[in-house]
Amino acid sequence: MTYKTDCTLPDELLEQIANQGLDVLPELIRTVINTAMQIERQQYLNAGPYERSPERRGHANGYKPKTVTTRGGQVTFDVPQVRDSSFYPQALEKGLRSERALKLALAEMYVQGVSTRRVAAITEKLIGKEVTSVQVSRAVAELDRQLQAWRERPLGRYKYLWLDARYEKVRVDGMVRDAAVLMAAGLNLDGKREVLGISVSLSEAEIHWRSYLESLTQRGLTGVELITSDDHAGLDKARKAVFGGVPWQRCQFHLQQNAQAYVPRRALKSEVAADIRAVFNARHRQEAEELLASAVQKYATIASDLADWMEENIPEGLTVFSFPENHRRRLRTTNGLERLNREIRRRTRVAVLFPNSASCLRLVTAIVMEISEEWQTGRIYLCLDHGF
């Protein structure tokens, strides 16, 4: 059953927006979130306002004010209540986890005395000037419980697996280090993607990748038929140890980039890229192998290092030809994880430098958790008509 709620903005608010622009943003946020929470309560009760229905699950019980600090300033929302107190709207909480994690990352820098003037200014704007270590510790503990539960949730059957890594600056024992952020996304039984987990460590060595992949299987990950990733250091050995019988598709996008390092003259770069692209865009594997053999022969005399590299590495990007044609475009690269990397980069750019690995893990988990939830409520990523 679907209920209609008037989601239009009041005329006076529209006029304010026209006259004041972004200055009226807090009121706009309040109106939109309040409307979303009202719809949630109607769906929870299975009945509209004042509607008599045998399917009704309870009764509305007014509203309770709640003030939240957002980037637009403090906003007081009208949180809908039900009589048995079993309902709490997710519209208010969704989107706030990563905001909270970012604030905590900045707050930790502030109370530990490692913040720059820029970080101190941002902290004061987002959180307020009076920030104590006790306040930060309490907030961290509360958020960490939620994020850890998500990272350790049970998994199930996933047909395809995408793996990627990125680096963030973290302060360790007074030194600035590069921490590797490992991430995995899987395609579930409904044809939708999920972020399966996140791990942060000071290296991308085999031991980190292996521990991370083993944690996924220990949580119940099974049914994987293809793994797509770049040729990350340490990943190859870890993947073979944990998923030894699963085919591997090397990311074609990264292969294209890697090839450029072996092109001896700038004038050849676009030609080489076109030849490799033709191999990847072939109609079937046999055609791809024929085009590859032709390209290797073509460059054997004018760019021998490139020819040797192509012959050895390009076949690792052709595994996808063994899978359904309508799946190949999204299986042949890790570009589907670019949204994750872009959102992580956008938030961590504000933090600049994390005071410790736990702070980095907290913010990154909150970000990808929100994106994963969006994927689950969005459109199907790949149609699995024939199942597993």
Image (cartoon, rainbow, N blue to C red):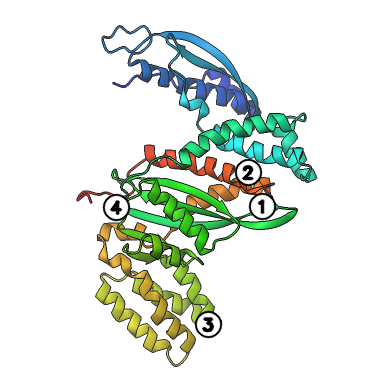
Give the residue type that dot 4 points to: Gly
Residue 236's spot in the image, x, y percent?
44, 67
SS at badge 1: strand
Around disc 4, counting alpha carbons within 10 Å, would you say few (fewer than 14), some (14 to 19), or many (20 or more)? some
Above or below 144: residue 361: below
Q: Residue at x 47, y 42 (%)?
A: 151
Q: Nearer the viewer, residue 53 or 145?
A: 145
Q: Residue at x 45, y 13 (%)?
A: 85
Q: Which residue is mark 1?
A: 170
Give the residue type that dot 2 points to: Ser
- Marked residue nearer the N-terminal end (4 or 1): 1
> Disc 3 vs disc 1: which is toward the camera?
1
Label drawn at residue 359? 2
Q: Which residue is mark 4?
A: 223
Q: Residue at x 33, y 59 (%)?
A: 226
Q: Are marks 1 and 2 in contact (CB under 8 Å)?
A: yes
Q: CA distance from mark 2 to mark 4?
A: 33 Å
Around disc 1, counting alpha carbons within 10 Å, would you say few (fewer than 14), some (14 to 19), or many (20 or more)? many
Q: Are marks 3 and 4 in contact (CB under 8 Å)?
A: no
Quarter of the rendering occupied by the N terminus: top left
Residue 184's spot in the image, x, y percent?
44, 52
> Disc 2 vs disc 3: which is toward the camera?
2
Judged from this view, the residue extending furthest toward the left is: 386
Residue 376's spot in the image, x, y percent?
38, 39
Label drawn at residue 256? none
- Marked residue nearer the N-terminal end (2 or 4): 4
- Marked residue nearer the N-terminal end (2 or 3): 3
Above or below 27: residue 53: above
- Marked residue nearer the N-terminal end (1 or 2): 1
Give the residue type that dot 1 points to: Val
Judged from this view, the residue extending furthest toward the bottom is: 301
Label drawn at residue 267? 3
